[in-house]
Amino acid sequence: MNPKMNPILTNADLACLAGLFDGEGTAGVYLHKQRNNRNIPIRSPQVAVAMTDPDPIRFLALCLGGNVYTCGRRTRGNRPVYKWVRAHRKALHAAQALLPWVKNESKVEQLCRITQHYGM
């Protein structure tokens, strides 16, 4: 487990985090252009969860590490959207922690793409 992740995660914690990811999360390996050389695309794995309630998002960050921020968009009711993100190699650690607990088949496939990206 990654040292930035909470080492005392119970099965209940992991199941709760996986439920959040099942409902509000997304994952994948996305193409981005390098900052130094704009012509060379790189692949960047990412795991993210976005929702209007900041408490579950903060819980994800506390347990799995990563960044929390407010998106530039708002809901129809003008509520801010909070987003938790783990990217690059750290996304692999989050994917490995969530994968055994995720129930949604399409989300399992998304997490598997990240593990396959790193040859796991």
Image: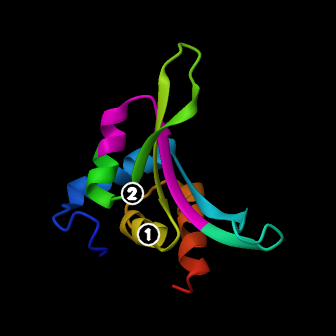
Q: Position of residue 98 (x, y in %)?
A: 39, 62
Residue at point 19% right, 68% down?
Answer: 7
Left or right? Give the position of 43 relative to 38: left
Helix, strand, or loop for circle 1? Answer: helix
Q: Position of residue 44 (x, y in %)?
A: 62, 68
Q: Residue furthest left?
A: 8
Q: Which residue is mark 1?
A: 90
Q: Which residues are magenta?
A: 45-58
Residue at point 71% right, 63% down?
Answer: 32
Q: Badge 1, how many Cα within 10 Å: few under 14, some, many 20+?
A: many
Residue 53 in the magenta stretch? The answer is yes
Q: Position of residue 62 (x, y in %)?
A: 26, 52
Q: Residue furthest right?
A: 39
Residue at point 20% right, 62% down?
Answer: 9
Helix, strand, or loop for circle 2? Answer: loop
Q: Which residue is mark 2?
A: 66
Query: Which quadrant of the view contains residue 99?
Result: bottom left
Q: Position of residue 72 (x, y in %)?
A: 58, 32
* The N terminus lies in quadrant: bottom left
Which residue type carries mark 1?
Answer: Lys
Q: Which mark is residue 63?
A: none
Left or right? Give the position of 60 relative to 42: left
Give the spatial CA distance, label 1 vs label 2: 8 Å
Q: Nearer the viewer, residue 102 or 69?
A: 69
Q: Residue furthest bottom?
A: 119
**Mark 1 touching mark 2, by CB under 8 A?**
yes
Which residue type carries mark 2?
Answer: Gly
Give the mark nearer the N terminus: 1 vs 2: 2
